[in-house]
Amino acid sequence: MTKIERLGVVGAGLMGSGIAEVSALAGLDVIVVEVTDDAARAGRSRLWKSLNRAVDKGKITEQERDAAQSRLHFTTTLHDLDDRQLVIEAIAEDAELKTKLFEDLDKIVGDPDAILASNTSSIPIAKLAAATERPAQVMGIHFFNPVPVLKLVELVPSLLTSEETVRRASDFATEQLGKQTIRATDRSGFVVNALLVPYLLSAIRMLEGGHATAEDIDNGMVLGCAHPMGPLALSDLVGLDTLKAIADSMHEEYKEPLYAAPPLLQRMVDAGLKGKKSGKGFYDYS
Ligand code: CAA
């Protein structure tokens, strides 16, 4: 089976723009779809900023940046994905929205061998696969934020995914993007978030309970356990709305209190404090 040359990414948020960036740098032609012109412009500007930063840091040349930019196309028309060999969905962590999108993609993407993948952290892949007529070619391909920095991709086949699909997704992640993969079963949170999310929620409960300040909780884990950043700063990086949505999906799946979003997280999301992307979360980024 041929390697992936034409990629579609749905959603130009933190994850979608990161996936588009590493894929364009790897030489793929990438179409990024957003719902509105404003969202497409915001995604494009995030991506351009990240590519410029990579040039400033000496990681890529100006020529490599320009070549990657020429391979990136932004649109608000889902039908533009009709000739794609792989589409990765990276929209909000909402099962209903994702299911509807997979239903639409299944009708639009013409290549019968094309793979429809989700970057979800917590929504059942089987549910997305069941919305299509090609469940054997649906799977989770889960990246980590910041996508250009973190090496891991979780490969998540559902009960219906073919081994050929997993092999092609694995080749795409490792040989084309230079990532490393682990394989997980289709259980909410897969491997990394099943461990990470309860830890992040515990840190929020600790802050809520007055055990320590945000700075001291984070410094504790950075200085005491050599984590690159503390759990509250990491929650801000993931996005508090995203963290809450992931926790809700995991709680729905396992019904265990360790996945229940603490009231403070809920209130912060209600108040529009979404972390780094909104300018304020546990820390102020303005
Ligand atoms: N794009 C490209 N490169 C970036 C970048 C970005 N968005 N952000 C940081 N970098 C690079 C920098 O250029 C720098 O590279 P050099 O050392 O070669 O110069 C390096 O990463 C370190 O960056 P900084 O010096 O700016 O800052 P830092 O040392 O504090 O690192 C960090 C920042 C990379 C975010 C680091 O703190 C980190 O890895 N944190 C943990 C992130 C993490 O755990 N992510 C997983 C989240 S969970 C998830 O994504 C899954 C989910 O479903 C929720």
Image (cartoon, helix red, strand yellow):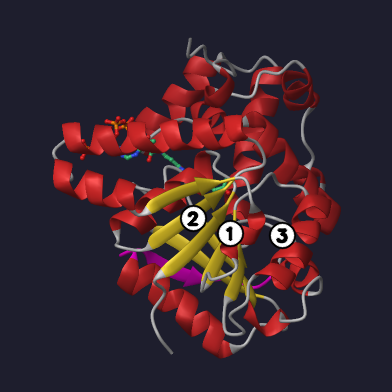
Kindly identify which residue carries mark 2.
Answer: 31
As helix, strand or loop, the secondary structure at mark 1 comes to helix
Answer left or right for 226 relative to 194: left
Q: In the image, residue 266 lies at what x, y percent?
A: 78, 26
Is the residue marked 2 within 8 Å of ligand 1, measured from its CB?
A: no
| Range of magenta residues | 177-186
> What's the distance in space between the residues labelled 2 and 1, CA to CA?
8 Å
Answer left or right for 274 relative to 253: left
Circle 3 crowding by C-alpha within 10 Å: few under 14, some 14–19, many from 20: many
State whether residue 255 appears in this view: no
Q: Residue 80, labelled with which disc?
A: 1
Q: Is residue 276 above or below residue 162?
A: above
Label located before the other in sequence (2 or 1) = 2
**Is the Cβ of the residue at disc 2 closer than 8 Å to that at disc 1?**
yes
3 or 1: mark nearer the eye: 1
Circle 1 crowding by C-alpha within 10 Å: few under 14, some 14–19, many from 20: some
Label located before the other in sequence (3 or 2) = 2
The one nearer the camera, 44 or 162, is: 44
2 or 1: mark nearer the eye: 1
User: Which residue is at 48% across, 75% downward?
Assistant: 169
Q: In the image, residue 143 lies at what x, y percent?
A: 49, 55
User: Which residue is at 42% across, 42% downward?
Assistant: 146
Which amino acid lies under the numbered mark 3 shown in the image of this protein? Ser
**182 falls in the magenta region:** yes
Q: Residue 188, labelled with which disc?
A: 3
Answer left or right for 193 relative to 181: right
As helix, strand or loop, the secondary structure at mark 2 comes to strand
User: Which residue is at 54% across, 71% downward?
Assistant: 83
Which amino acid lies under the numbered mark 2 shown in the image of this protein? Ile
The one nearer the camera, 199 or 161, is: 161
Q: In the image, residue 205 lies at what x, y percent?
A: 70, 27
